[in-house]
Image (cartoon, grey):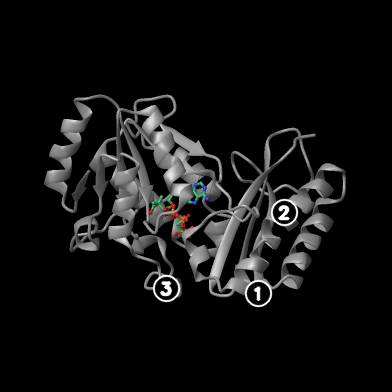
């Protein structure tokens, strides 16, 4: 496995991989867990070579967010990726990704505006900018992202279509189902911020979401079900609920009632030092 930090060696190494068949890219911010490794395994099934990027992207963190605290453990991450048969790890520095006088911003309107877009102003511009750079740097045949970040996946799909990013395959932007801990909590690098007590309390998030989905699917008023969900989280040790919304699964517009199209329940809530997000499918009427 090659570990590469600068652009020219990256381009030669990826050209060599490309000559052996399709190349898959798995973009990450490191601090890898089973969720990331599941993306890597899926990438190996779908392509001849796998490139994993590890870059904690300052552009997608707000001024008061956890950029400095975000876990960085490149050596451990590389050992995990080597064991998974990854071909190349692309780990640029901030200076390589954003050289002096960098001045371009990729902004996707509509799908990026509500939910995390509203709670984290500028976040999805940062994600869209770095992901478009990663696509241009690696020029993969396909790229894999987790459904845990459902809105991010929708933003990246929109961006790839709108900018004619030349990812050649039909499955070019491939979403992978959320990988969960045994008790149902979605795996996330930020779970590491939780104390054992907070970690135990955090299971209320997927549990309360499932309960809300049962209510919505059995005809309870959506507003009432979401208010019940928020009250349950606050009573279980969560400090605040940034949002809890029933949305159209594709364009993420907020829904007041269950409808005939695929829907998603999306929640972001704070516990201890962590802000956790999760989303689940809701059966159409
Ligand atoms: N539990 C999970 N299941 C499936 N995919 C996941 C999971 N967690 C993260 N991913 C995906 O891995 C990729 C890299 O995510 P990232 O490095 O931000 O990890 P993370 O655990 O989501 O971290 P964070 O705590 O910042 O949310 C993204 O496409 C993300 O959706
Ligand atoms: C896609 C991504 C790697 C861009 O920095 C990040 O948002 C993430 O890890 O989900
Ligand atoms: N997994 C999404 C990256 C972020 O929260 O910044």
Image quarter (top left, top right, bottom left or bottom right) of the C terminus: top right
* Picture layout, residue 283 above or below residue 204: above
| Residue 259 appears anywhere in the view | yes
Q: Residue at x 33, y 55 (%)?
A: 77
At label 3, counting other C-alpha atoms closer than 10 Å, the crowd grade (few under 14, some 14-19, many 20 or more) is few
Q: Is mark 1 within 8 Å of ligand 1?
A: no
Residue assigned mark 1? 239
- Image marks 3 and 1: residues in contact by CB distance under 8 Å: no
Q: Find out whether the residues at labels 2 and 1 contact each other: C-beta distance under 8 Å.
A: no
**First of labels 3, 1 by sequence position:** 3
As helix, strand or loop, the secondary structure at mark 3 comes to loop
Q: Is residue 273 left or right of residue 283?
A: left
Q: Quadrant of the N terminus?
A: top left
Residue receiving disc 3: 63
Question: What is the distance, in whole Å, between disc 2 and disc 1 at their CAs?
Answer: 17 Å
Disc number placed over residue 134 in the picture, else none = none
Q: Circles 2 and 3: CB distance less than 8 Å?
A: no
Near-viewer residue (43 or 101): 43
Give the labeled residue for mark 2: 209
Where 272 sits versus 71, above or below? below
State the residue at coordinates (22%, 25%). Answer: 20
Residue shown at the point (19%, 25%) measured from the top left:
19
Indicate if the residue with disc 2 has its beta carbon within 8 Å of ligand 1. Answer: no
Image location (x, y in percent) of residue 195: 56, 74
Image spot of residue 70 (x, y percent): 40, 67
Between the C-alphas of marks 3 and 1, the distance is: 20 Å
Q: Nearer the viewer, mark 3 or mark 1?
A: 1
Please identify, in this view, whether the residue under mark 2 or under mark 3 is nearer the observer.
Answer: 2
Q: In the rendered view, would you say 139 is above or below 118?
A: above
User: Residue at 61% of width from left, 45% of height from top?
Assistant: 252
Horizontal side of 260 relative to 11 (left or right) equals right
- Helix, strand or loop at label 2? It is helix
């Amino acid at each position: 496995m090659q570990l590469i930090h600068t652009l020219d060696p990256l381009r030669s190494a990826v050209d060599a991989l490309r000559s052996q068949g399709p190349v898959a890219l798995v973009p990450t911010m490191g601090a890898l867990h089973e969720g990331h490794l599941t993306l890597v395994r899926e990438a190996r099934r779908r392509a001849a070579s796998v490139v994993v990027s590890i870059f904690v992207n300052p552009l997608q963190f707000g001024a008061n967010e956890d950029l400095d605290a975000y876990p960085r453990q490149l050596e451990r991450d590389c050992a995990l990726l080597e064991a998974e048969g990854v071909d190349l790890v692309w780990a640029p520095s901030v200076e390589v990704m954003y050289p002096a006088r960098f001045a371009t911003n990729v902004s996707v309107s509509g799908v990026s505006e509500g939910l995390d877009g509203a709670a984290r102003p500028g976040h999805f511009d940062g994600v869209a900018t770095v992901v478009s750079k990663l696509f241009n740097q690696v020029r993969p045949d396909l790229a894999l992202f987790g459904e845990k970040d459902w809105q991010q996946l929708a933003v990246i799909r929109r961006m790839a279509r709108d900018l004619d990013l030349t990812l050649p395959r039909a499955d070019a932007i491939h979403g992978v189902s959320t990988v969960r801990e045994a008790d149902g909590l979605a795996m996330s690098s930020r779970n590491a911020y939780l104390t054992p007590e907070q970690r135990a309390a955090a299971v209320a998030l997927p549990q309360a979401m499932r309960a809300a989905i049962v209510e919505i699917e059995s005809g309870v008023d959506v507003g009432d079900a979401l208010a019940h969900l928020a009250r349950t989280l606050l009573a279980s040790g969560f400090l605040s609920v940034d949002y809890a919304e029933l949305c159209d699964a594709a364009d993420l517009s907020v829904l007041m009632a269950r409808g005939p199209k695929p829907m998603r329940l999306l929640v972001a809530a704070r516990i201890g030092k962590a802000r956790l997000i999760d989303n689940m499918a809701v059966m159409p009427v």
